[in-house]
Each structure stands twice: as structure tokens, then as C-alpha cells.
Image (cartoon, coloured by chain):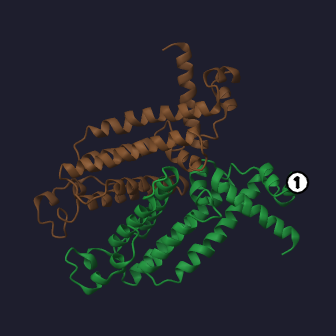
Chain colours: A green, B brown
């Protein structure tokens, strides 16, 4: 890595951490330059505009997200193990030290949804990609026979995302110590519905239902 | 209403509409003055600081929310009718013409959760109040016998809020035409779990289960 690349990388990491707290619009070139002991013009040499910087911050975040959440989780077995891994790693990501303000995609979504432009377009593309990952993992669970055939993958994805978003509200804004456990309990219930009444009826008559990971996995509540 | 009060009211309405799009931090005193053909100093005479304006914008939003969502919904019968009314009116609120950027509390939450200060504190108080309304309505449903006794009201509230938040993501950022129908389907499923297996087992053996509003209510999908 050249010195220029290393500086660029350092700027992007700092800008990512900053924008998790103050949003993408809140990134200040002046504060970034101060924090990194660079001149403003030196910083502008790397990113010609705030918009270019915002776009690259999102790109860095996506790369990190794919490496720490998506790629390892997709190695898990189809069905519950894979979806649980996606959800747990997603929670880890939102609590990561490098994102003091929580998930950058969550804060950027509510910030940018009504601001037309290239940043909003890129964010919507990335979010749709992630929703597609969740929906595809759900479909793979159906194909393997682990989930109900009449489950709608997009429905599963939207509800799972809701659990992550309300986790942010309860844990971060309301500082509710039970927010995380409730997010997990909600995801358990979502998985239970995905497995469906055939395998998890009230009577638990089949061995499969008794041994289903939904019932036996460690829970935090 | 005196002329001063009317001006103040007009400023707050405009600031509320603006902040639903650009956030509470994005409120610009200069643009507000332009939009309303007031001088900046005239505007400052009404609100000594941007923070005072932000706090009053939230107050106005809360008053409107209570009038259009909470108060009418609480007149509905305990249990499903009341919770459905709360959820439907909440969706209406998020789509209201006076909030071009969607629910102000949603955007403000992701914006302010990491910005300590009086605005964050007020927002957290209002959000907790609303979560308590949802939890209390859930508890009333338990007391009336409509919902399972082992249901956790706070769990219900957090999951319901998640459905509203992911509705914002899907409908507003991703412009997914099915986002709203999925939010409703998710809420149907949440209510079904609240009613519980005793009344809604697979066999639908009781008359009550067959006639439950969860099953017969009009759905948009």
C-alpha cells in the first residue's frame, strides 16, 4: 500500500466512524482534516467533493459488512443455521467498536431516503442487495425443506429488518437493556413461523420438531 | 390567536414539514425565514435558538400524533380492535401530506440517538411514551382475555415498532410497492401470536377462533 493509499484508507475509516454518529450529511471535511492532522486541501486531493467521500464511505462499509457478516454466514448450513448466523453477525456489526453510532446503513437510510441524488441511489442499491441476501437465504431454506413452501422470502426479510431497526431504537435511543434480547426473541418467533405448523405444531409429535434448532438454541432471555 | 401566535404556529408547521425531510439538524433558520417571507431576526424573536425550535417542533408533532393516532384509537375496544387502530393510524400518520419525509419520530430517532442533549432527551421521552401506549394497549388486551397471559407487552411493542421502521425502509428508500402490505401482514402475524394457540390452533375448533378479527379483517394483500 502506497503512502497515498494508506492516507486515503485512514480518511475513509475515520469518516465511516464519524458518519455512524452524525450521519453522512454530518461528515465535516474540516473536522476530518483536524482529526487526522491533514490540511483541508490535502483531504480534498483525495476526495474532490463531500459527495465523493460519502459514496466511498458507503463502499468501505459495504466491503466490511460483506466480510464480517455475509461471507461467513453463507458458509453455514441452509435454513435456520444460515439465517441465525446472518442475524447474529448483523447484531455484532451494529455493536462493533468501529461504528460508535451503530449501523451506518440504518442511520443513513432514515437520513437519505428523501434526499435524491447519487448517495441515496447507492444506498438504496446496497440495501436492496442486503435484503436480497436475506430473501435468498430464506429461499434456500425452503428449497432444503427446512422452511414452509408458502413462506414469502421478501416478507421474512422485511420483518427481520424491522427487528434490527427496532433494536436500534430500543437499545440506542431508549437505552433499554432488554432491547437486544427482545430482538433475538422476535427473530426466534420469525424462524418458528418460517418452519411452520407442520413441524412445530402444539403437540410436537415429530422428532424433528422436538429437536429443531429454533427450540433448542441458546437464547438470551 | 394573536398575530404573533399565528406566526409562531406557521413557523412550527413549516419547520415540522421540513425536518421530516432533512432531519431536525437539517432545519435551516435561513430557509425557514425565506419560505415564510420573514426576516431571520423576526424568526429568532420567536425561537431564541435552533435547539428551542427543534424542541418545539417535536412538541407540535407529539400533539398532532396524540390527536390523530392515540386518542381516536384508544376509543376502540380493548384487544385487537384497539391495537389495529393504533397501527393503522400510525401508518396513516407516516403517509400524511404534512410530513413529506415520513414520520418525524422515525427520522429523528436515527439522527439523534448519538447526539446527547435536550433534543435527544425529549425525543427519547416521547418515544418511550409511545412505546408505553402500545404496551399498555397490549396489557389491556390481556386483561380483557383477548390476548395470551404470557405475552410480554414490551416484546409486542418492540416488534410492532420494527414493522413500522422496516415499512419506512422498504416503502420510502427502496420504493417497494409491497412494503406497506408486508407491514400489515407482519402485524397480522404479530396479533395472531398475541391471541395464541389456544384460540387459533390449527383446527380452529372454537367459534371464537373462527370469528376472530385477525382472520376476517380486510387485508391489503
Whole-percent x, y for residue B106 in the image: 50, 47
Q: Quadrant of residue A129?
A: bottom right
Residue at disc 1, secondary structure: loop
Question: Which residue in the protein does label 1 denote?
Answer: A39
Direction front: furthest residue: A177
Residue furthest top in the image: B2
- Quadrant in the picture for residue A177: bottom left
* Rendered location of residue A118, percent (x, y): 68, 56
Which one is in front, A30 or B30? A30
- The image shows residue A155, relative to residue B63, as above or below, that is below
Q: Position of residue A199 (x, y in %)?
A: 27, 79
Q: How many marks?
A: 1
- Whole-percent x and y of residue B56? 54, 31
**Against B119, is A169 above or below?**
below
The vertical placement of B18 against A214, above or below, is above
Q: Residue at x 65, y 70 (%)?
A: A64
Which of the 4 quarters of the picture holds residue A145? bottom left
Please name the residue shown 66% across and 20% down the image: B42
Amino acid at each position: 500500500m502506497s503512502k497515498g493509499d494508506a492516507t486515503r484508507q485512514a480518511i475513509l475509516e475515520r469518516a465511516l466512524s464519524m458518519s455512524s454518529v452524525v450521519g453522512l450529511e454530518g461528515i465535516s471535511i474540516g473536522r476530518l482534516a483536524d482529526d487526522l492532522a491533514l490540511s483541508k486541501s490535502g483531504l480534498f486531493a483525495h476526495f474532490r467533493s463531500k459527495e465523493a467521500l460519502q459514496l466511498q464511505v458507503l463502499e468501505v462499509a459495504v466491503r466490511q459488512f460483506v466480510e464480517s457478516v455475509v461471507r461467513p454466514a453463507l458458509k453455514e448450513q441452509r435454513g435456520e443455521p444460515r439465517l441465525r448466523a446472518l442475524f447474529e453477525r448483523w447484531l455484532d456489526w451494529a455493536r462493533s467498536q468501529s461504528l460508535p453510532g451503530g449501523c451506518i446503513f440504518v442511520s443513513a437510510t432514515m437520513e437519505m431516503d428523501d434526499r435524491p441524488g447519487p448517495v441515496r441511489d447507492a444506498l438504496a442499491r446496497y440495501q436492496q442487495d442486503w435484503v436480497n441476501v436475506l430473501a435468498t437465504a430464506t429461499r434456500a431454506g425452503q428449497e432444503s425443506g427446512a422452511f414452509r413452501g408458502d413462506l414469502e422470502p421478501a416478507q421474512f426479510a422485511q420483518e427481520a429488518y424491522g427487528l434490527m431497526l427496532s433494536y436500534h431504537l430500543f437499545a440506542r435511543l431508549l437505552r433499554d437493556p432488554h432491547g437486544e434480547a427482545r430482538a433475538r426473541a422476535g427473530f426466534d418467533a420469525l424462524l418458528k413461523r418460517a418452519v411452520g405448523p407442520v413441524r412445530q405444531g402444539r403437540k410436537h409429535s415429530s422428532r424433528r420438531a422436538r429437536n429443531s434448532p429454533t427450540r433448542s438454541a441458546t437464547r438470551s432471555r
